[in-house]
Image (cartoon, helix red, strand yellow):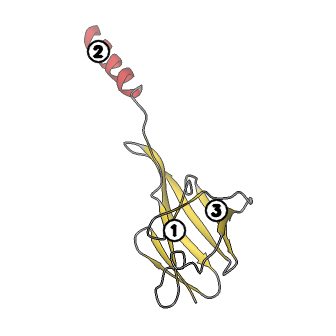
Amino acid sequence: MKKIVLFLLMTFVFTACGEECYNAPMPIVFEFVDADDKNLITNGTLGPFSISDENQVGVQLTKTDDGKVILENVGAYNGTKNYTFYSSLKMFDFSIESSEFKGGCDGYQINKLTFKGVGIDVKDEKGHYKIVFQ
């Protein structure tokens, strides 16, 4: 009986100390277009731009070859965080609501993006947000 209890205890210890894993939130991709669905980055209309969080910390942005922008390292927190997009063409605010999840791997998931701005239309296409400047 002692051997069985010892075996179960050792099995529990070794599985509990296994390699930890972490799931980052799904990436957020923005595509900026005009009313005619023309990409504003690839046609040169949208010049330099940036995104900052509510603490004025800049968000790392990665431009893709097809004129989209990936927001790096956002959504890894519990709660809602506010952001501002700055450019000479348009400025708007948005917020990201995310939460922690636990399961096979711990991590965070983005639950909702809310856009606030005049003269924009946003189409959510499964983590890819087409932002139409009007």
Q: Which mark is residue 131?
A: none
Q: Residue 121, relative to residue 84: is it above or below?
A: below
Please state which amino acid type lies under the numbered disc 1: Lys
Rounded to the nearest angstrom, the CA distance separating label 3 from label 1 is 11 Å
Q: Find disc 2 in the rendering and name its residue.
A: 7
Q: Which mark is residue 81?
A: 3
Q: Residue furthest right?
A: 56
Numbered circles on residues, count? 3
Disc 3 packing (10 Å; few <14; some 14–19; many ≥20): some
Q: Which mark is residue 112?
A: 1
* Residue 24 coordinates in the image, percent (x, y): 47, 50
Residue at the image position 63 percent from the left and 74 percent from the top: 47
In the rendered image, is residue 1 in sight? Answer: no
Task: Give the image quarter of residue 54.
Answer: bottom right
Residue at the image position 57 percent from the left and 65 percent from the top: 96
In the rendered image, is residue 97 in sight? Answer: yes
Nearer the observer, 40 or 79: 40
Q: Mark 2 vs mark 1: give the one in front.
A: 1
